[in-house]
């Protein structure tokens, strides 16, 4: 029997981050490992006690220095009395029991002297100490003895601000759960090396943005009440429990109270965190933050003499308007497609526009940082605030900004994902710019409608499987339900956008009483293959393949969504699986569908397949 949810597989750890203010960490041993553990505890704002044999002079140099500075407290084990509550088999265990009885408030214990070169603790003694701690419900980590560990230390890294060098609140940790500590350190270094250097600063700026979102929505007399009813960002963003950043953010209304306003603004912060490039987040100024949290959709004037920052974090002076307009070069607007996301799929025309022609780039939110990074530092970059619930206002904002800049003689690149005319609203912008005196040049891009299926190993057409394909949208204008085409066995349906509305899309496809069937069309069979492709062509690409019957369950069972996403529906989804299946359109091909689907998904499987990352070889481009 198929199960609707993943089966737990043991051997992992529950990864948590502890706040240790006003807590005490007890560390047994005084070598370099003890110093490392002490430093980690201090950075977590914990008090630290070192319990070791041989006195302070036997401690490592770092511990001696921290003891002298008053950062930690040292207790000589040799001077501890034994417990009066009953004998233990181990003298250290007896004295430890007495010490714990006299020292309340210890929250964590770390035994490091099982790896010491001097005073090295035996396994039997470590077991006795472990039992003492457990009798008092104190979690223990015993170095190099996993069976005596309630928790383990990840190989961690704390990021610094790329400009000031100060440590930030951003940390990452890697654990192999005792299977390879040295390898964990290497993996951690590899991860750190591949992250943008501005990532720590980005966390700092987003933290400031969240504070502004909370503090600026209510007068001081209401702040106390808000603090009492405060909730976390995850709850504010996803009250339904579904981890997707793609839900519409409600517009401001005159009747909302302070808490509702705070929730709305925190949702804006979450969307900015999801969509903006790291470098852009790291370079946010106070004015940028105020613009993000603005109560309306006004645009910034390009006639102000202000300092702005491009996506690479480089400041430039925004020149004021000049009065000798007749001496200026004429401005122009380029509508440019950036392709599906992988930088190698940019056309030469797009690269030229971004690297040689642009004075200002107005970018859609989903254009990835890898594409934006090729833009020279002197070019100003603005990211559209076109989040769900704000699409119309943000669209107007970007078009007005393009016209204002072009009037000042600038070359404006309106950068769109994929191809500008494939659900990129290029037509609206062409007519708008034309009505304001500018004839834009439209530069095509590689459309994700064709590229994404290829990256997922799915041919939109294939002899013997799919003779044609249709591209449509899963999101109707102003929230209206879209009219989807009826089922044709020899056709592939490509649905751009709409993954956040997956249930409604599937219901429309399989509804036997819907508009399509009333027009004489056929509803889609529940066993029809479907693939959801998320972040196509990017390193974190994910493909979830299933049938129309199980795809909603498959998506919900595999964690948070990864916008942008699209759907491929039809028998082409399984055409190139394994040895291939080119007999879909053969005579009596439909009679083999059940066997075909089982062979594809695997008998007894969950009912779906999940593939992460790009096919081997794309790292060369």
Image (cartoon, rainbow, N blue to C red):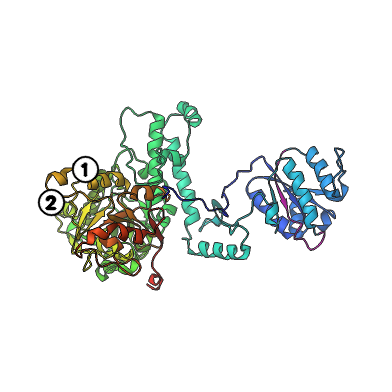
Q: Main secondary structure of the magenta part?
A: loop
For image coordinates 63% across by 43% down, the residue present is 20
Q: Are marks 1 and 2 in contact (CB under 8 Å)?
A: no
Label number found at residue 481: 1
Which mark is in front, 1 or 2?
Answer: 1
Q: Where is residue 186 drawn, in percent x and y?
A: 57, 66
Q: Where is residue 51 drawn, in percent x and y?
A: 79, 50
In the rendered image, is residue 56 in sight? yes
Provide the residue span drawn in magenta: 105-119
The residue that label 2 is drawn on is: 435
Q: Secondary structure at mark 1?
A: loop
For image coordinates 55% across by 62% down, the residue present is 188
Q: Toward which corner of the image does residue 518 lie, by quadrant? A: top left
Q: Secondary structure at mark 2?
A: helix
**Horizontal side of residue 204 vs 574, given as left or right:** right
Among the two numbered marks 1 and 2 on one chain, the one whose residue lies closer to the N terminus: 2
Number of labelled discs? 2
Q: Where is residue 310 drawn, in percent x and y?
A: 37, 57
């Amino acid at each position: 029997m198929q199960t609707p949810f993943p089966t737990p597989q043991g051997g992992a750890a529950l990864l948590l981050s502890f706040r240790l203010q006003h807590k005490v960490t007890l560390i047994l041993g005084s070598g370099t490992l003890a110093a490392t553990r002490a430093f980690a505890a201090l950075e977590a704002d914990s008090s630290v006690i070192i319990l070791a044999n041989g006195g302070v002079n036997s401690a490592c140099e770092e511990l001696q220095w921290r003891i002298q500075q008053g950062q930690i407290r040292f207790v000589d084990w040799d001077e501890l009395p034994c417990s009066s509550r009953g004998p233990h088999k181990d003298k250290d265990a007896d004295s430890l029991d007495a010490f714990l009885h006299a020292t309340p408030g210890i929250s964590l214990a770390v035994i490091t002297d099982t790896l010491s070169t001097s005073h090295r603790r035996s396994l039997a003694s470590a077991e006795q100490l472990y039992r003492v701690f457990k009798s008092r419900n104190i979690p223990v980590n015993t170095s190099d003895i996993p069976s005596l560990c309630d928790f383990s230390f990840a190989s961690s890294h704390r990021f610094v601000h790329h400009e000031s060098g100060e440590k930030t609140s951003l940390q990452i940790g890697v654990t192999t759960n005792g299977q390879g500590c040295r390898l964990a350190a290497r993996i951690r270094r590899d991860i750190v090396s591949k992250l943008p250097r501005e990532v720590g600063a980005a966390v700092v700026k987003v933290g400031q943005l969240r504070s502004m979102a909370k503090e600026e929505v209510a007068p001081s007399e209401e702040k106390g009440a808000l603090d009492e009813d405060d909730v976390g960002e995850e709850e504010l963003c996803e009250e339904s429990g579904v981890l997707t950043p793609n839900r519409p953010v409600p517009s401001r209304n005159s009747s909302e109270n302070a808490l509702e306003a705070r929730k709305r603004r925190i949702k804006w912060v979450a969307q900015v965190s999801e969509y903006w490039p790291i470098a852009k987040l790291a370079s946010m100024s106070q004015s940028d933050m105020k613009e993000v949290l603005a109560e309306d959709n006004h645009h910034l004037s390009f006639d102000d003499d202000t300092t702005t920052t491009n996506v690479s974090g480089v400041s430039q002076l925004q020149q004021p308007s000049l009065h000798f307009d007749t001496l200026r070069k004429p401005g122009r607007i380029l509508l440019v497609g950036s392709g599906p996301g992988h930088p190698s799929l940019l056309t030469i025309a797009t690269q030229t526009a971004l690297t040689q022609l642009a004075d200002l780039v107005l970018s859609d939110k989903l254009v990835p940082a890898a594409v934006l990074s090729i833009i020279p530092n002197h070019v100003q970059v603005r990211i559209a605030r076109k989040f769900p619930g704000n699409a119309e206002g943000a669209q107007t904002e970007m078009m007005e900004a393009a016209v204002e800049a072009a009037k000042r003689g600038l070359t404006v690149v309106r950068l769109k994902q994929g191809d500008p005319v494939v659900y990129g609203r290029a037509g609206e912008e062409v007519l708008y710019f034309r009505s304001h005196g500018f004839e834009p040049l439209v530069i095509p891009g590689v459309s994700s409608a064709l590229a994404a299926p290829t990256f997922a190993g799915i041919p939109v057409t294939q002899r013997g499987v799919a003779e044609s394909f249709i591209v449509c949208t899963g999101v109707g204008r102003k929230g209206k339900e879209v009219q989807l085409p009826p089922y044709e066995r020899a056709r592939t349906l490509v649905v751009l956008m709409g993954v956040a509305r997956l249930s409604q899309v599937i219901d429309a496809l399989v509804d036997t009483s819907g508009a399509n069937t009333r027009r004489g069309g056929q509803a889609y069979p529940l066993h029809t293959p479907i693939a959801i492709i998320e972040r196509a062509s990017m390193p974190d690409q994910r493909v979830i393949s299933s049938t129309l019957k199980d795809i909603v369950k498959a998506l919900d069972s595999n964690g948070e969504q990864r916008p942008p996403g699209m759907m491929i529906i039809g028998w082409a989804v399984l055409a190139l699986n394994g040895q291939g299946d080119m007999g879909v359109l053969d005579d009596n091909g439909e009679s083999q569908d059940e066997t075909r689907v089982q062979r594809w998904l695997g008998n007894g499987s969950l009912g779906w397949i999940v593939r992460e990352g790009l096919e081997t070889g794309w790292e060369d481009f």
